Image (cartoon, rainbow, N blue to C red):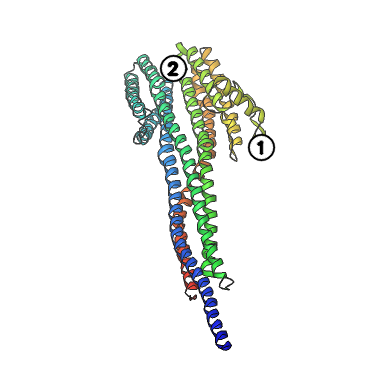
Amino acid sequence: MATVTANRAQSQAAPTTVSTGNRRVAGLRSWMLTLISSAIAFGVLTGLLAWQANLTTYNDYHTIVDEGSVSVDAALRARAAVLDHMSAAATFLETTGEAQQAAASRAQERWTAFNNEARVSWRNITDSTHGESNVYASADRAASDYIQQIGSMFAYYNSNQRDRAGDAFLAARETLNTRLVPALTGLEAVKVEAMEATYAGAAERITRWRYALIGVAGFLTLILLMGLLAIRRMRYRWSWPVGLPLLASLLLALYMQQELGQASNDARIMVRQAYDSVAGVQDVSANLSQARALESIAIFDPEQSALHLASFGQYNELVEQRLCGPRDCTANTFLSSQDRIAPAVIAAGLNEQGKLGLPRTPLVANVNFAGQAAAYEQLRTDYRAWLDAHSQLETQVRAGDIGAASGTSAGESASTFAQVVESINSANRVARAEYDRIWQRVYTVSTINQGLAIIFPLSGLFAAWGIWRRRSELYA
């Protein structure tokens, strides 16, 4: 009887041990099944977020570069072209022979350039809220009136009515200065404002997508890590179908968040540092074109030469305000070393900006790229050389020696001004190169990363397969 009782106790104890083992295995199988589903779901979700984050980055940069800066560039080039056209027309009136024919040819070439650039800017009218269409209409009407007056100038000149030709030119210049240039400047301002708004919104959007990607990718790597730990509970030291997707997802997530952070920061550099410098150099170029034209105007209109020379002085002030700030700030070097703006020069420029309430920072106070400071110093040196030639021309005009002044204008002043233009172009290329480098890099990286985003769902699927394979070895 005692034997029967002992056997019954043993038979009842055995199922209890088996049931506990089965529950442990069943729990692990259930947990691994959850990890399989989660790996697939979060892999797909992370891939979609990564793709959308990079697509948003690409689209925002596209808006800044291919809509905003293209229009601003076109407006800046159109303004420069029409000012060059006016300068060539003035040169036509104050020269003869081959020089006059060259001026007429240049005037035609620059008017064609103006029309081409104007069309680029006109076809990108997008900001009706800030009156962009009204600015365009004003510029269009002013351009039409201006070229009609210039046409009258050539017609009067060819019919030997020199005085009436000069009057027609001065009327055209008035139209240019009071209507066309302000309209082009307004169009530029509207587009720059839109660019800066786009850049601010782009930086914020990219940052939000970046944080979202970090969070979801973190969940994915956590799920894959838990899958690896679950497999280790089966006494496996390593499972490459789960470990490799874990490493791939982690490294790709870190890489993408770094690139998105770089793109967010570069948007500010591209607009505020690089493109502001590009636009600033263009402003200097525009004022110099008007100043150069005034030399010719003073020669063919000597009766009003004092007024024209005074206007030259005003444009000289505008050039120096935009370049370095205070009056005569170009008289001394900008540099404290080979490619570094002196702190005192920067402080003087910022002080002048604050004192006059100027909307834009002087160029010397916005130096951020290699070679930029040296380029501004070269521009300063060449500008002072041109001012020396202008002083000689001014002395001759005030003395009534118009023939000598005309020779100086066509000779020394023309050659030194050509060097100034070359220095302006060199300074522009420094900032433009950095601007182009940033957007080209972001275009390339964001496009590639849209393709790399598929690694996340593939990693999730591959890890799910690895977990499923190990799970199939467990039997409850």
Q: Is residue 330 visible?
A: no
Give whichever of 463, 21 is nearer the camera: 21
Q: Is residue 143 left or right of residue 297?
A: left
In the figure, 110 relative to 172: above or below?
A: below
Q: CA distance from mark 2 to mark 1?
A: 43 Å
In the figure, 36 relative to 136: above or below?
A: below
Give whichever of 80, 341 is nearer the camera: 341
Label 2 secondary element: helix
**Which amino acid, by three-letter code, is at mark 2?**
Phe
Q: Horizontal and vertical percent for residue 229?
A: 56, 66
Residue at left 43%, top 54%? 48
Q: Horizontal and vertical percent for residue 275?
A: 50, 36
Question: Quadrant of the rendered structure where residue 127 is?
Answer: top left
Q: Residues within 10 Å of mark 1 (few under 14, many from 20)?
A: few
Q: Is residue 90 visible?
A: yes
Q: Is residue 284 left or right of residue 66?
A: right
Question: Quadrant of the rendered structure where residue 108 is?
Answer: top left
Label 1 secondary element: loop
Q: Residues within 10 Å of mark 2 (few under 14, many from 20)?
A: many
Residue named by callout 1: 338
* Number of disc labels: 2
Q: Horizontal and vertical percent for residue 330?
A: 60, 25
The N terminus - image quarter: bottom right
Q: Nearer the viewer, mark 2 or mark 1?
A: 1
Q: Earlier in the sequence, mark 2 or mark 1?
A: 2
Give whichever of 286, 385 is nearer the camera: 286
Residue named by callout 2: 300
Q: Horizontal and vertical percent for residue 144?
A: 32, 25
